[in-house]
Amino acid sequence: MSRVSLSGVLGGFTHAKIIDVEDIIAQSSSGDASITFNAIGIPTGGVVTNVALHLLEAFAGGANSEVLIIAGDGTDPDGFVRSVDFFQGGDTGTAFCSGAYFTGTDDNAVSGGDATANVVKGKVYASADTIDVKIAPDDEIQDLTAGKLVVCATILDPASYA
């Protein structure tokens, strides 16, 4: 997997990792239904406030007709980004903060007010973890011939100020 320098990170994210078809082929085996990458490390005490998957090149190849991608952690596999299809002709662009860690409502919202206005979105980590990205084509993973995405995250590390 290629690393992206901070100067090349999109829109103010603090961390990014590119995953392309070569990484997928190199780290998978024939017959694998999916592969999960530990894409970005999260430090103990870290706070993940944003996660996005941005399509750089559509996935294609073989008898595949979709490539579903999710992002989460060891607790919730799609806690950051719910399923998005980045296969050629599928979804395009960016999937951003659609998982359970970024959705919810405020039970104390003023009647008639915005029930999402006061919801703190993100996750605080008591111990180190990783942002995991699962890539699951509907046929043979080894038949993919194209595809590239960048995983972007904003991770605050309060311990770095101690």
Image (cartoon, rainbow, N blue to C red):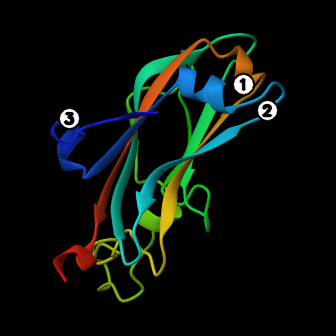
Instruction: Judge from the rendering whether residue 19 lies leftward or rightward of residue 8; answer left or right.
Output: right
Q: Which mark is residue 33?
A: none
Residue 38 in the image: x percent, y percent?
Answer: 54, 50
N-term mark: 1 or 3: 3
Q: Residue furthest bottom?
A: 108
Rendered view: 137 above or below 53: above
* Residue at the image point whose x is 35% and y is 72% from the top: 46
Q: Secondary structure at mark 1?
A: helix
N-term mark: 3 or 2: 3
Rendered view: 105 above or below 62: below
Three-letter amino acid code at disc 2? Asp
Work out how far the residue at label 1 is from the one at label 3, CA to CA, in angstroms: 29 Å
Identify residue for label 2: 32
Identify residue for label 3: 8
Using the image as rendered, state which of residue 118 and residue 59 is in the foreground: 59
N-term mark: 2 or 1: 2
Residue 23 in the image: x percent, y percent?
Answer: 55, 28
Do labels 2 and 1 touch, CB within 8 Å? yes
Q: Is residue 103 visible?
A: no
Identify residue for label 1: 141
Residue 1 in the image: x percent, y percent?
Answer: 47, 33
